[in-house]
Amino acid sequence: MPQFRSFSRRHFLLAAGASAGASLLNSCAINPPSAADLSPKASALTLSPAQLPEVTTVKLGYIAIVESAPLLIAEEKGFFARHGMTNVSISKQASWGAARDNIEIGSDGGGIDGGQWQMPMPHLISEGLITKANRKIPMLTLAQLCTNGNGIAIANKHIGKGFGLDLAKSGCADYIREMKAAGTPFKAAYTFPRVNQDFWIRYWLAAGGLDPDQDLDLLAVPASQTVANMRTGTMDGFSTGDPWPYRIVRDKIGFLAVLNGQVWPDHPEEYFAMREDWVRQYPKATKAILKAVLEAQQWCDDPQNKEELSQILAIRKYFNVPATFLQGPYQGKYLMGDTFEEITDMSLATAYWKDSRGSVSYPYKSHDLWFLTESVRWGFLPQSILAEAERIINTVNGEKYWREAAQELGIAAKDIPQDTSRGIEKFFDGAEFDPKNPQAYLDSLRIKAIRA
């Protein structure tokens, strides 16, 4: 594995005193850290003619949550330029719907060529299931961006009602059903329908004995509106990515009921994917971008870089929040539950390169299959789609590009998965997903909405 110690951040010398420290961190939410506070950028490589990208320009989109960090760091720390991609444009997307619209029109039409995606958006876009006029826009998933970094926050008015990992055991499931019976249903939101954050809250609710489609109201709200909707009392709960759940807690308008890493340890989060036509036209540029993302993921996972990572992401043009809202999650520190008990558990911290199961970055085909299977579970896709799952996954999954990029970077063989399946996945409620038998997983689930 390449060594990036020369790029590691020097330790910040924070001003003494709580008020002075808070002032410094809040200022970093608006202005970039000074050059003296940053580690050196990655040095450019001398590329052979065979390595030179066909183009040096690409437009990528991101949403302001921690999953986007590898893309932002690849630009900020010079990893894109290191591999010859000297004109990369990273564009903040107003919402996931805007990202979908921009990938449809592509950079030639003022949109984007790729970027950060919830799953299985690349598959749905490729199949024309969420595009205008059902137009198929073939895409390729090239890397998983991270694990963890997502949570479900609940409004303070529900303190003492038992919101936690096991809703059935605490009696909270009955409380939510009583709200519906009284004509004031619990309202919970995610940032885009039928993808990651919708799946996370549905799984948690169903494991607690609640039917997400019958016992409460679920709806989509952009991540940028998360805090405002919770503050005004129009939402009872949110499933979204850091720093927004953490901010809800720090702003004292809600509490964290559960982290997705508790529901599914080492779960796949969002992905880096691009339009297939761009990849086919510029394969060397694609590989250069991918190498930069992989190096950025390693940089993000280096403990010595966590402070600098927090400071960079916090600035106005990216997340525009105090750096403290990122420092805690990167250390596995959360104020949990309605008692706001502080926990420290690095297995729940956002990871970009490795976790207890091995590679975070490699795009396992078995994870693609879970997302499609979960889509069937909730009636988002017909059950017949499982018969086409292998075709869809093999068409969209770009793991071969990841593998080639990793090998050319000199990544150790032990860090390059040899199997496209990560094997059996286990969830907090005892359910198991065996990618060799997705139907058995569906059959084992008590609450579901399968359609023919």
Image (spheres, grey):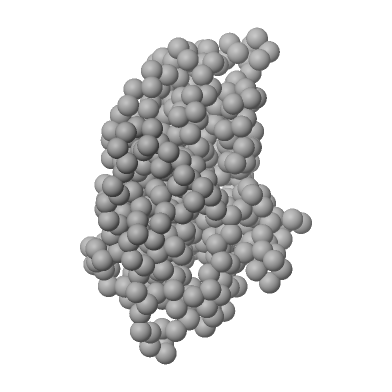
- Residue 162: which quarter of the image? top left
Can you give x and y, in whole percent of width and height, for residue 158 in the image?
52, 16
Res. 167 in view? no
**Rendering coords of residue 225 (x, y %):** 62, 37
Quadrant of the drawing holding the N terminus: bottom left
What residue appears at the point 38 percent right and 52 percent down from the top-left corner? 309
Question: Which residue: 35% across, 84% down?
Answer: 46
Residue 113: horizontal and vertical position, in percent? Answer: 59, 67
Q: Residue at x 45, y 19 (%)?
A: 163
Q: Going by the picture, which residue comes out furthest to the bottom?
A: 49
- Residue 185 visible in the snapshot: yes
Name the image quarter holding residue 76.
Answer: bottom left
The one nearer the camera, 76 or 414, is 76
Q: Is residue 327 left or right of residue 384?
A: left
- Left or right placement of residue 21 versus residue 190 in this view: left
Q: Is residue 400 above or below residue 151?
A: below
Q: Residue 231 at x, y = what percent?
A: 59, 26
Return the residue nearer the eye: 439 or 246. 246
**Quarter of the image where the C terminus is located:** top right
Task: Give the residue displayed 64% in from the left and 55% down from the top.
Answer: 100
Q: Is residue 280 above or below residue 350?
A: below
| View extreme (right): residue | 133
The number of callouts visible is 0
Q: Nearer the viewer, residue 8 or 110?
A: 8
* Vertical order, 265 against 272 (above or below): above
